[in-house]
Structures are given as C-alpha cells and as structure tokens.
Image (cartoon, helix red, strand yellow):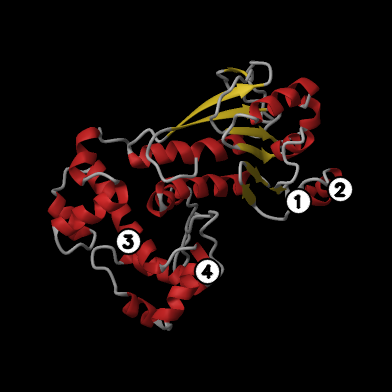
Amino acid sequence: MFDSNTSPVMLDLLILPETNLILVASVIEPLRLANRVSGLELYRWRIMSPNGQPIETKSHIPIPVDGAFQPGKEEEPLFVLSSHNWQRHATSELKRLLAKSARHRSVVAGIESGTWLLADAALLDSFSATPHWEDYEEFATAYPNVRAVRERFVIDGKRITTGGSLPTLDLMLELIRRRHGYSLALEVSRQFIYEQGGARGTTVAMPSTGSIRLADPRVSEAMRMMEEHIEQPLSLVRLARRIGLSERRLQSLFTAAIGAPPHIHYLALRLNAARRKVIETRLAFADIAAATGFNSASAFSRSYRAHFRESPSDTRKRLVVPSHRT
C-alpha cells in the first residue's frame, strides 16, 4: 500500500456501530478527493459491518454497507473503525475473525477506538500504537504488550493506528503522499482548507495534515508568497530575502515544518495549478505553461510528465471536465 504506484488500491473498511460520521469521512473523503484531483481511480473501498446490517452512527444517520465481515484470505488493507462503546460490539467471534483475517492482510489499521479492538484481539502485541490522547494511560495499562506512544498516528510495519478523526485525516494524506507523491497529497489537503468568514489581512489558511504543521510564521509567509507568485515564480534567494532569512535558513525551516524543501513545495503548487487548468479549461498548453511559471511548453510538459506520469495531452484526452465541487 505504501509503494509508489498508480495501480488502484482496494481497502476493506470494517465499521462498528456507534462510529462517528466524521471518522468515516476522515478515511473515505481523502481517497475520493485523490481520485477526483488525479482524474484516476486510485482508490476503491468496500464497507462492511459485523452483521451485514447498515451501521447506526451516533448521529442516527445509517451508513449502507456492502455486506458482513466474513473474511477469507483477502490481502487488501483492512481498516477497523470504531468510536463509542467498542466493547459492546467486540464479540469473541468478531475478534476471532479479525485474527484470522490479519494473517493474510497486507496492513491492518485501527482507527480511533479500532485501536482498542485490535489490541484486545492481540493484533498489536509488540507493535507501537497510539490511542486517543484521553485514553493513553488506560490503554497503556490495559495492554502492556503493546508499545503505547503519544502520537497522532503510528505506522509500524503491517499495523497502523490513529488517535482520533483529524489524526486519521492526517494519516490518509500521509498514505497518499507515500504512494502518489507530495504534489497529490498537497492538492488533496488543500481541499480541506477552512477559512473563517470575513478573515482578512495576513491570515493564511493552511491544510492541517500529517506533513504540514506550521508552527513558524515565516514558513506560513513563504507559502503565502509562493501562492501569490505562481505565474512569475520568485527565486528562493529573493523569497528568503523578503522574509528576512538566508536561503539556507529558509530551507532548514521549511524541511522541519513540512518534511520537504521549499523548491519541492513551490513546484508542487505550480504543477497542481497547471493540472487544474489542463482538466478544467481548454487553454493551450503553451498558455498554461506561461500561467504557471514555465519558460516553455516543452519544459512544462517534461515536468508535468515527471510528476504525474502522463503528459498534459494524455490527461486531457481521458478526462471529462468535472464539476468544481469538493
């Protein structure tokens, strides 16, 4: 699941009753957006419940399912989602089926209280795992064979755990980044930007993701300036000078904040802007190249192909112009 690849990934989602809608959305929506943004079916998913009945959420909005959790020898990643009262649904039969299924799965993930269910089925023994922050002490005491850690999410070999809904969103963006690269993960994360109504001035909306956690306002300012200079990109020297830093210091701050150097982030912004124009307009590629800061159509085409594994013309040929809705 983590290898760089464009072949579709099928995920099995086992959702327990009383799970929050936002937790389910935190898993599915980044995958849906990755498909929409890329114009490819990169991800598919099946939804299962313990008994095959629609899942009754805490919001009293039922979630339809594809069937009951009756595993055979499926190798697809299995995500186990639970929010409230996981013990009520953690029957001995369900734990037996989870243990049986885990022998074949490439990855098994415990999402929020799904972490408790995996631990109770002895599927996290000798693995690092994270529960919700409120439950850390209780979890660590209850399962001494699990290496409990205080993190938003943990990827430890064939086991994944998360500590809540927004950490799950962070996790999904990280999985997209590992498989499909920084550009796609960035563009998906930007779909979740929230701006308070009427916000003005220097306030910059930034995605809350596993790889983009901005504590340094100078990095935020650099990102804002990159956004404002897509057509005529600033050199890193000029960008750093405007913020009052050396180029080397900007490189260091950027890498510490988002796990990527500034030139990678800047190029991803420009190429994502270009891909939107390729998909959503009929502009000539030379015009798109000029609008996104490339010196020539050929330079644009080379960079586009290197990032998206297809040419701009390939993208346009296979796509119907989508709506602008997220």
Front residue of this view, candidates 157 and 164: 157
Vertical placement of 76 versus 113: above or below? above
> Which sits earlier in the primary sequence, circle 1 or circle 3?
1
Q: CA distance from mark 4 to mark 2?
A: 33 Å
Q: CA distance from mark 4 to mark 3?
A: 18 Å
Residue 140, percent from left and from top: 82, 49
Mark 4 neighbour density, 10 Å: few (under 14) some (14–19) many (20 or more) = some
Label number found at residue 267: 3
Q: CA distance from mark 2 to mark 3?
A: 47 Å
Mark 4, residue position: 256
> Which sits earlier in the primary sequence, circle 4 or circle 3?
4
Residue 122, percent from left and from top: 77, 36
Vertical placement of 48 versus 134: above or below? above
In the image, taking residue 189 as reference, residue 281 lies left or right, namely left
**Label 1 element class:** strand
**Label 4 element class:** helix
In the image, taking residue 60 as reference, residue 27 lies left or right, namely left
Q: Residue at x 49, y 63 (%)?
A: 259
Q: Amino acid at mark 1?
A: Ala
Q: CA distance from mark 1 to mark 2?
A: 9 Å
Label number found at residue 141: 2
Displayed quadrant of residue 300 = bottom left
Q: Amino acid at mark 2?
A: Thr
Label number found at residue 148: 1
Displayed quadrant of residue 23 = top right
Q: Nearer the viewer, mark 2 or mark 3?
A: 2
Q: CA distance from mark 4 to mark 1?
A: 25 Å
> Which sits earlier in the primary sequence, circle 4 or circle 1?
1
> Which sits earlier in the primary sequence, circle 4 or circle 2?
2
Q: Residue at x 74, y 24 (%)?
A: 96
